[in-house]
Each structure stands twice: as structure tokens, then as C-alpha cells.
Amino acid sequence: MADLGRPAYLRLADALRAEILSGQRPPGSRVPSIAELHREYGMSEQPVRQALRVLAAEGLIEGRPGSGTYVRERPTLVRVARGRYRTPGSPYEAETRARGVEPSWSHSSQKTYATAGLAARLGLAEGDPLMQTQYVFRADGVPTQLSTSWEPLGLSGGTPVVFPELGPLAGVGVVLRFASIGLAPTRVTEDVAARPILEAEATSLGVPLGTTVLMIERTHWAGDVPVETADLVLAADRFRLAYEIEVPPEAANWSSRPQG
């Protein structure tokens, strides 16, 4: 291990990382134990543990209770198209089928009340009633995405679409459901951020703690009225988001630019 100016644990992490990325330690292979690395590299256990923590945080290795530490499988990035509502029904269902895999999801709905943050997103007063629905989305049975959505009961309460996954329009998506009660969404806004995964999310998605996730804060609007907002969570090492943005003709009209 070169660069003796670097801390010992980083030099060990560098050496193991190089072996993993080169294929010398292939996905699924067992990483030597702390005692084995201690003997092989002549380091005390503390820097060995620190090096393994670095590699786990980078998503290169994962611990398996009762078994040891292994090189993680490196998933192929899946391109997820955002900003497209050209076909009726669930966007997730359409996107997943377009990749040649079978979509499915589980869900749970319950009445809740707007926090200050949700009230701001939905243009409501804090404490207003909401329908909250939590989803685990799957592709060929494998969890790929989590979502928690909130809809104002002041809009959907007492209608056939109050429950997103029950009734005559169950599972068809926000656009068709709200269009059926005269609140057809006309635009969707999304804010995307990256953050560390939460423990409950790691369990649901079947990925290790330390994974970075993409969090999409999405809101459906009917004119100036927000009818639904949701937090979508995807593992950042599995997906990349692709946005299609239309440029109106007038934006390319040179003659429309102010002169002088």
C-alpha cells in the first residue's frame, strides 16, 4: 500500500477498493475477517474496522449477520423517465413494463393530519385531514421504490376515489382519479435530493444501511390547486432519473429578443 502519509485505515481501504473494482474480489465473494486482515496487513484491529466501515459506506461491501462481510453485487443502473404523462394510468406501471419487467405494489392507506411541512406543500392549514398512502413498488417481485403520498380529504373526501387503491379507479394513478372528480391535474412539480437511507427504508428495499437514496418530492396540481404530494425514495446506485423538457417554439425565436 503506497502513500504512507495517509492514515493506515485509508490505505487499507484503498487496497481493498482497488481489488474490488478490478474484479480481483468479485461480487458475492467473502471479505477476509478483521482478524485475517489484521494478520495480512500488520495493522491493529481499529484501523481494519475503520477501513471496512469506509467501504460499507461506499456501498462496496455488506455485512451478513452470522456469515461475515461480502462484496456487494453492483446493480446495473436503470434509466427512469420522468416528466412523461403521455399514457393513461399509473406512470410506474408504464415505465416498468417499458423495461420488460412486471410491475406490482403493496399499499396501506390511513387518515392523518397535515404537519406544517405538508400544509405548506398542499396549500392547507396545519392539522387539516389527509389521506396518507404508503407504497412498496416492485419489478418482477423485487422492491425498487418506496412512496408515501398525501391527498387533501377536503378535495377527495366523500368521493369514489378517496382511497387511491380501492373503488372504481383503484390503482390507475393520480391523474385519472382526480380528473374523474373534476380536478384534472395539469402539471407536476418535482424536487430531487440525495440523502442517506433510513433504517426502515433499507429494510423495505433490501439494501444495506449506508446506501444513498434519491428522494423525489412530487406534487400534482390542478391549475393552482395541489391535489396530491408524495415522497418517492429510490436507491441511487440502482437508478438514474431522466427528464424530458419541451422547449416552446418562441424560446428559439431570435426576433422576439429585446433589441438595443
Image: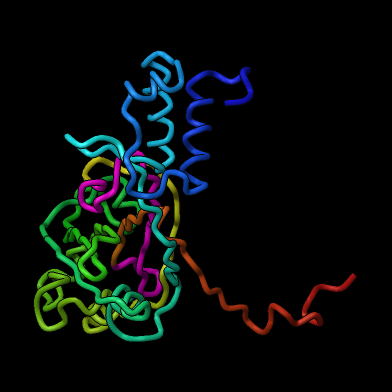
Instruction: Specify the farthest residue to the front.
Output: 40
In depth, the one of 17 and 101 nearer the eye is: 17
Left-right relation of 69 to 215: left
Q: Residue at x 51, y 69 (%)?
A: 243
User: Quarter holding the N terminus?
Assistant: top right
Tell me which corner region of the image, top left, top right, bottom left or bottom right, holds residue 56.
top left
Residue 203 location (% of width, % of height): 21, 47
Query: Is residue 217 rendered magenta in the image?
Result: yes
Left-right relation of 196 to 21: left
**Where is 56 relative to 28, above or below?**
above
Residue 83 location (% of width, % of height): 45, 73
Query: Is residue 149 rendered magenta in the image?
Result: no
Left-right relation of 223 to 6: left
**Count of labels shown?**
0
Residue 23 location (% of width, % of height): 47, 49
Instruction: Specify the farthest residue to the right.
Output: 260
User: Quarter holding the C terminus?
Assistant: bottom right
Tell me which corner region of the image, top left, top right, bottom left or bottom right, holds residue 67.
top left
- Magenta range: 201-227
Residue 258 location (% of width, % of height): 81, 73
**Where is 2 relative to 83, above or below?**
above
